[in-house]
Image (cartoon, helix red, strand yellow):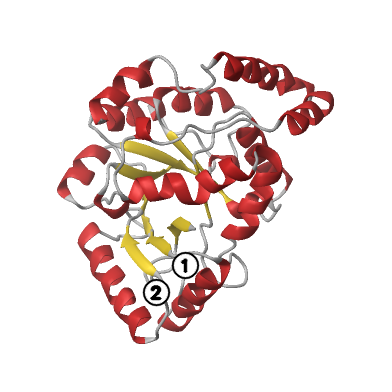
Amino acid sequence: MIDLHCHILPGIDDGAPNLSIALDMANASVADGVTDLACTPHILPGLYANTGPQIRQATQQLQDALDQHGIPLRLVAGADNHITPDFVAGLRSGQLLCLAESRYVLVEPPHHVVPPRLEETFFGLLTAGYIPILTHPERLSWIKSHYEVVARLGRMGVWMQITAGSLAGAFGKSAKYWAERMLDEGRVHILATDAHDTKRRPPNLRRGQDLAAVRVGEVEAEHLVTTRPRGVLANVAPSNLPTPALASQDVAHAETTSVSNHGHEIKDRHAAQRRGDSHPQRGTSRWLRRLFE
């Protein structure tokens, strides 16, 4: 498995506080079945003033420590980039970081308020040649009132990453509900841990994969933690990677009988899947994807 979101770099943000914890997290990830891991500390001006060069250096230093301790885990540099007005310029200058020098970039919006010009920000990233990955949308406090915004972003070509712990209920009932709903509706591209330590927020990607498989099947669960993440690291165009699958028919049936407010949408998407046009990214994303192939 490949974990594309992890706060393992020691002493750089609210993740691992020191090298000892970072090594424990690395060992836990390997034991969980992870072979490749993206080091993605926060870049948040005023709180976590990390920069691209600093993160690259810290990633190499941790990789050297892993090699010295015989921990078989390959690290790549990245960042949990918080939205800033000059996002594209920051990426081009190297102050903000894509994942493993690819076109794919983690983007974290504010948790408690919808930022102004959110869709314009993501559209600017897409037209500049990047594939933004919205991190843990299921945990945003505003997702209920602005779910259509998240859906529109997906149709534009924005990728979605949910947290493994959300499926296990680690972030509460709301995050679990939205994570499951987004999976059921075929909106999720990546499953990652967003691990910060080994106890409170530990590496748990296998558990997330198992829970996802119950809803979308073993093949799609594998795409969430291996196929698409491997494509990200190799900088493969989105059009050459598998599109997210919908919930299995039995799960969808259970959801439509218990949650009427989105059951019809799931059934409509299953009908579209049988017609061969199931993927929620439509319209704008078609010509955007042609730019990146």
**Left or right: residue 262 compared with residue 189:** right
Residue 74 in the image, given as x and y percentages of width and height: 36, 67
Q: Are marks 1 and 2 in contact (CB under 8 Å)?
A: yes
Residue 208 in the image, given as x and y percentages of width and height: 62, 53
Say the numbered circle drawn on residue 15: 1
Residue position marked by numbered label 2 in the rendering: 10
- Helix, strand or loop at disc 2? loop
Alpha-carbon neighbours of circle 2 within 10 Å: few (<14), some, or many (≥20)? many
Nearest the viewer among 214 and 260 is: 214
What amino acid does circle 2 point to? Pro
Residue 138 in the image, given as x and y percentages of width and height: 59, 41
Which badge, 1 or 2, comes first in the chain's sequence?
2
- For the question of whether residue 180 can be seen, the reply is yes
**Left or right: residue 89 compared with residue 235:** left
Alpha-carbon neighbours of circle 1 within 10 Å: few (<14), some, or many (≥20)? many
What amino acid does circle 1 point to? Gly
